Amino acid sequence: MLSFFRRLYKIFYPPVAPKSSDALRFGILGAANIAPQALIVPAKSHSEVIVAAVAARDQKKAEAYAKKHGIPVVHKSYDDLISDPSLDCIYVPLPNGLHYEWALKALKAGKHVLLEKPSVSNAAEAKSLFRHPILSKPNAPVLLEAFHYRFHPAWQYFLTLFNPEDVQEVEVMNYLAAGIFPRDDIRFNYALSGGTLMDFGAYAVSTIRQIFGAEPTSVKSASFRPMPEGFDKNADEAVYASYEFPNGGTAKITADLQARGGYWAPGMTKDWPRLAGAFPTLFVKLKPKEESVDGGLVKVTAKSIVFHCYMGPHLYHRLDIAITTELKDPSKDGKVVKSEKKTEYKKAYKWQDNGERKGEEWWATYRYQLEEFVNRVKNRKGSGVWVDAEESVRQMEMIDATYEKMGLPIRPTSNALE
Ligand SMILES: NC(=O)C1=CN([C@@H]2O[C@H](COP(=O)(O)OP(=O)(O)OC[C@H]3O[C@@H](n4cnc5c(N)ncnc54)[C@H](OP(=O)(O)O)[C@@H]3O)[C@@H](O)[C@H]2O)C=CC1
Ligand SMILES: O=C1OC[C@@H](O)[C@H](O)[C@H]1O
């Protein structure tokens, strides 16, 4: 318990590192809610990162934000920030529908870009951005879709627990209690490329693609809960989808940004904001393995894994690894003669290997991600975790395919598309 509070404290109030002379200078586009968590606080403990400037549509807002977060420079506009020659990197935490335009402008200005997830609005934008000639020139700038959870050791450890070929079933459940985001939030605004599939749903799509180590062969089913009367008809408030994979396995996802119910006495409580499942969770079931053993018996081993809080593993997480072994007797119609279940509980706040890869118990997913972003810019080896450009393209293809199956339009393409 003490280590939990100690970790939380350090996540929010990390030790401040003295900055090196070659630290990368970041500018932030927009006085975004997510930036303190995703960049400003993680930067404090990174000796090679300085959050140097911010711009907002309203300069007063930018000034107040800069003061609050100790950002020395405020630019008058997004364009001014991007053309600031003293900046090396631009962080783009704008609404999804503006990601393409501003990421491309920043790349064209020669800046490295840390781009919030989902990278862009749809696959057409993703192909244009991630395959842009600017990115294949010598000394090309770095562009990263900020799927932060992937950079945490807990996620990477989880991926070592199975062979993707053996995965039979996956279920991802991402609930966020109703009322946390108002229904006029950018997340529910189609024109800004909102929708739950673009938000909590994007994590779910990203996880299943990694777990199977492959792209789905089809979106088997997809449906959504629409926004209530008077709100955006093209935004999905919750999404339910299933997918088939090349090895025959299947995945089911649920993402709900206005989740209610989940209590006893559902008749009375169905409209209460849902707290059950408050930590996004995923379940993996592997194909059972059969082998012949002494006495003419058959041993069947089945493994399943539950990953609690996979999206924010720095706050808390737990991996439950259950192995069930059954001995069956083929001469008695496969009767189970012995059965045993063992469950191990694991966690990984740091890398599990010999300490070559950098990290601390209290590093948030965003801090691990920042470490890799800097390593990439500085051409260093790092932890080896990255989100490749083509992966970001395939991710948006799967989101488009899911919207199509749901019967909703894919998110609108930017007028700036090249
Ligand atoms: N990695 C993570 O864990 C998370 C990632 N995200 C992602 O980050 C991005 C931003 O999310 P979040 O910080 O919650 O969003 P905010 O609601 O804080 O919006 C971000 C910024 O968008 C700017 N903006 C520009 N145009 C518009 C417009 N037309 N309407 C509204 N805002 C506008 C605003 O900038 P200005 O200050 O100039 O007015 C605002 O500061 C999204 O892509 C989201 O998916 C969000 C939460 C968590
Ligand atoms: O990326 C995100 O992670 C946390 C969520 O609360 C948020 O909706 C989403 O944008």
Image: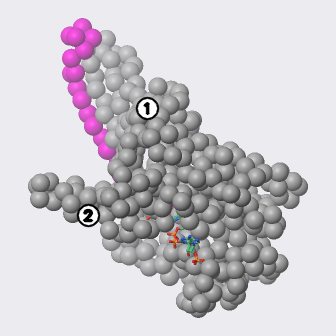
| Vertical comparison of 162 with 92: above or below | above
At x 79%, y 79%, the residue is 84
- Residue type at mark 2 is Pro
Quarter holding the N terminus is: bottom left
- In magenta segment, residue 337: yes
**Does the segment drawn in magenta span residue 249?**
no
Vertical comparison of 407 with 128: above or below: above
| Residue depicted at x 53% and y 80% | 14
Residue 224: x %, y % from top left: 37, 46
Q: Give the total of numbered labels.
A: 2
Q: Which mark is residue 228?
A: none
Label drawn at residue 220? 1
**Which residue is depicted at the point 26% across and 64% down?**
273
Task: Count residues near mark 1 (Cα–Cα under 10 Å), then give few for <14, some for 14-19, many for 20+.
Answer: some
Question: Which quadrant of the figure shows ligand 1?
Answer: bottom right
Which residues make up the magenta segment? 330-352
Q: Would residue 389 appear left or right of 36 to someone viewing this image? A: right
Residue at numbered disc 2: 273
**Residue 136 as seen in the image, left or right of residue 169:** right
